[in-house]
Amino acid sequence: MPRRARARRTIAVALHDIEPATFERCALIRDWLDDHGVDRVTLLVIPARDLHPLNERSPGMTSWLTERRRAGDSIAQHGFQHERTRRAGFSPLSFLRAPARRTGEFVGLGTEETQRAVNAGWRVLKLAGVEPDGFVAPAYAYTPALRRVLPGRFRWWAGLLGVHRRTVETDGDCGRLLAPAWGMGTAGRLQRTLSPALIRAGGLLSGETLRLDLHPADLQHPRHMIALERVLGRAGRRRDAITYDELLAAQS
């Protein structure tokens, strides 16, 4: 009996938080990935951090995104403004205003508000000539309203534990391809301390597909970058780089 062909081993890298303010760092990281043999990356673009049209705010970044897509990268919408602030609840000391705090962009929004934010972000990217292939919620903070909205607009959306695809027949979620994402994210002090060990563990424990998350802020943490470099050094010899689009196409 012939042996079963060995499954193709892949690496799917996502570069988060791309916007005019982080563009130079993101371009540097993208070149660094190329140097490590990662020729396919999913680029997560924030449409309107400051509520200005992307193509007017940073035409250089828009041109770069277009070039990267031609070279094989995929583009995903990364929220609308990426984050928002909210005031804490009522305090007995009413003469003191509670400080604003950051929260997930879609947390607390109803379906209509969520729909408007998602559609507005999509239009900004579409007008800039970089219509997104999929969607990734900032900090992977999905809400029931956001999950209801996404199938009407995107082919796929990615969470912390996997990537979801939409079906043409039902225009809904066809289930999740399990592939945990490894990265530092918007890390606190403890996670920054543990991130090198977690990245190395992810490189060793991942199955057919290794998902890595990179952020422009990663450049400020040398130990984290060294761990990523070691993982990419091994992966470059053993895995083929793919985008999230290609990841789902391979599982169809």
Image (spheres, rainbow, N blue to C red):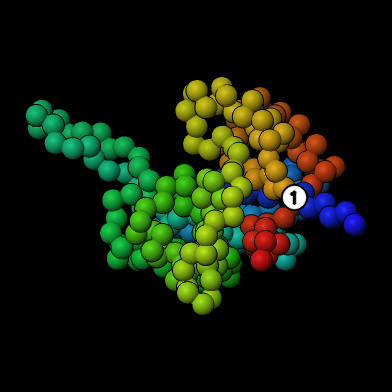
Q: Is residue 141 in view from this perspective?
A: yes
Query: Viewer-proximal residue, 98 or 166?
Result: 166
Residue at (40% x, 65% y) in the render:
149
Q: In this view, does 240 lie above or below 117?
A: above
Q: x%, y% of residue 89?
A: 18, 37
Residue type beneath disc 1:
Thr
- In the displayed image of the protein, which residue is found farthest to the front? 1
Q: Is residue 145 above or below residue 95?
A: below
Residue at (53% x, 76% y) in the render:
168
Provide the secondary structure element on which disc 1 rests: strand
Q: Is residue 124 in view from this perspective?
A: no
Mark 1, residues whose alpha carbon is within 10 Å: few (<14), some, or many (≥20)?
many
- In the displayed image of the protein, which residue is found farthest to the right? 2
Q: Which residue is under mark 1?
A: 10
Q: In this view, does 163 lie above or below 98?
A: below
Residue at (64% x, 61% y) in the render:
248
Q: Is residue 95 above or below residue 4?
A: above
Query: Viewer-proximal residue, 235 or 28?
Result: 235
**Residue 15 falls left or right of residue 86:** right
Q: x%, y% of residue 95?
A: 10, 31
Q: x%, y% of residue 241?
A: 75, 51
Q: Split into 4 quadrants, where in the image is the N terminus?
A: bottom right
Q: Split into 4 quadrants, where in the image is the C terminus?
A: bottom right
Query: Viewer-proximal residue, 128 or 185?
Result: 185
Residue at (71% x, 62% y) in the render:
250
**Residue 46 falls left or right of residue 235:** left
Query: Viewer-proximal residue, 174 or 192?
Result: 174
